[in-house]
Image: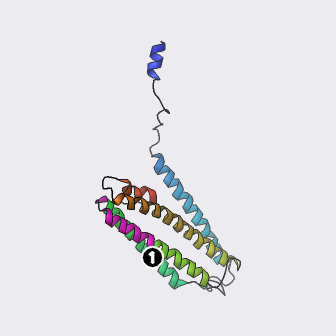
Amino acid sequence: MTSHAEAVHDHHGPPEANKSSRIDARVLGMLLFIASEAMLFGSFFTAYFFVRVVNPGAPSEWPPEPYHFPVFVAGVNTAILVTSSFTMHWALQSIKRGNRKAFLAGMVLTFTMGLAFLFTQAVEYLNVGFNTGDGAFASVFFGLTGLHGAHVFVGLTLLGMVIVRASADISRPSTTSASSCRGSTGTSST
């Protein structure tokens, strides 16, 4: 009986993971992360709309005096971010086709656009004419745009790591680490 028990439990390492879940743990983790980010940004948008509704001049006067929306700068930054999503898509399609140089070019272009976004946002902060202590609108404005800028910064950090890794892989055609950028950047290439 002892030899049979040893034969059944003769394995090394942790036990086999439970496969009862219908969703992969990595996918579930990413979905939960995205849900938490949606709740975080949702709370800031809720604060923004609350401040807007309780404003005495609302809705005719928004933003309240003496504030003004930097509409042109916001439009430029939106155009930069939307365009960078196309360059990222181009990079991912390039690596799928095995074109490492186009992949790297697309990644560097995307990174450059992200830097341009952050630079433009910093210039906007310097020229907007108010600061975080100037009322609820100013606090929500800087909180929401700062949170978004922090997310772009983290994304650029990850993108920079992928670019460094992909640059090293250009000289080694048999490596495949550059194609792992999809998981590193959190993007989907479908």
Place residue 166 in its image quadrant.
bottom left
> Is the residue 187 above or below the residue 115 in the image?
above
Q: Residue at x 45, y 21 (%)?
A: 8
Closer-to-camera residue (150/45):
150
Give 62 or 164, whichever is nearer the viewer: 164
Residue that label 1 marks: 80
Where is 131 relative to 22, above or below? below
Q: Is residue 106 magenta?
A: yes
Q: Position of residue 143 (x, y in %)?
A: 63, 71
Q: Position of residue 31 (x, y in %)?
A: 49, 54
Residue 128, horizontal then vertical, whole percent? 61, 84
- Secondary structure of the residue carrying tag 1 is helix
| Color scheme of the displayed model | rainbow
Q: Amino acid at mark 1?
A: Ile
Locate residue 169: give its quadrant. Answer: bottom left
- Using the rendered view, name the quadrant where residue 66 is placed: bottom right
Q: Is residue 187 left or right of 130 when viewed as pictured?
A: left
Q: Position of residue 189 (x, y in %)?
A: 37, 60
Q: Residues within 10 Å of mark 1 (few under 14, many from 20)?
A: some
Q: Which residues are magenta?
A: 96-112
At horizontal 47% and vertical 19% (from top left) the residue drawn is: 6
Does residue 48 show up magenta in the picture? no
Work out whether residue 45 can be spotted.
no
Q: How many numbered callouts? A: 1
Question: Mostly what secondary structure, the magenta segment?
Answer: helix
Q: Tell me the quarter of the image containing the C terminus.
A: bottom left
Position of residue 99 relative to residue 16, above or below, is below
Q: Is residue 98 visible?
A: yes
